[in-house]
Image (cartoon, helix red, strand yellow):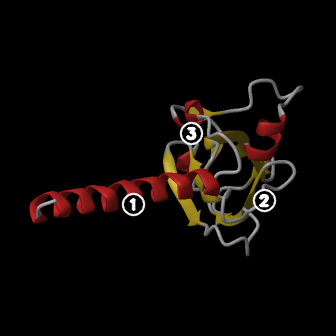
Amino acid sequence: MDRRTFVKSAALTTLSVGILKEAFAAEMSSPGKVNRGLFETINRVQNPASKSPLEMSHAPVITAPAKVKAGEPFTVEISVGEKVHGMGPTHWIEYIELNIGNEPAGRIDLQSKGYLQPKATFTVVLAQDAAPSGMVTLIARQRCNLHGYWESSKDISLT
């Protein structure tokens, strides 16, 4: 075997081993098959009376007063899932965000280490002109590394 052939085959072997190693590592870090369809759109609860286990553990839950006064602070808590989503190195929530209608209000980014529960608390103050109709919609979004984007909303009255 001449030197050129040896170098080519050694390089190809090294490249192949690297690709296989990455593929194996990705397969090992996922506890199951990832449903890529969950990443194609924003997921929402389809039937609130009969939620699937995936919906119960991934749809954001918004806790906020039903009625608030303009100009006065109030608290909005968002937790991921009715039973709070677990966090670990293979399955975690990447971020939680809150929008007031179409306007961004806040966002937190989470790490996969497992130290935190995926919950966020925001202090919000709404001006009267934020809701000319007297109603405003809070929209919570989150992204799970295995189960995609999820969204929930809650209407509140502004007086």
| Sequence-first tag of 1 and 3 | 1
Q: Mark 3 or mark 2, which is nearer to you?
A: 2
| Res. 42 mark | none
Instruction: Kindly state the secondary structure of the residue where label 3 is placed.
Output: loop
How much space separates mark 3 and mark 2, taking CA atoms?
39 Å
- Identify the residue at horizontal 85%, vertical 48% (top origin): 82
Q: In the picture shown, does residue 56 fall above or below 110?
A: above
- What x and y, as percent, mark residue 93? 65, 57
Label 2 neighbour load within 10 Å: few <14, some 14-19, many 20+: some
- Identify the residue at horizontal 68%, vertical 40% (top origin): 153
Instruction: Kindly state the secondary structure of the residue where label 2 is placed.
Output: loop
Q: Mark 1 or mark 3, which is nearer to you?
A: 1
Could you tell me the amino acid type at mark 3?
A: Pro
| Res. 86 mark | 2
- Identify the residue at horizontal 74%, vertical 31% (top origin): 45
Camera-side residue of 111 and 118 = 111
Q: In the picture shown, does residue 46 fall above or below 151?
A: above
Quadrant of the snapshot with the N terminus: bottom left
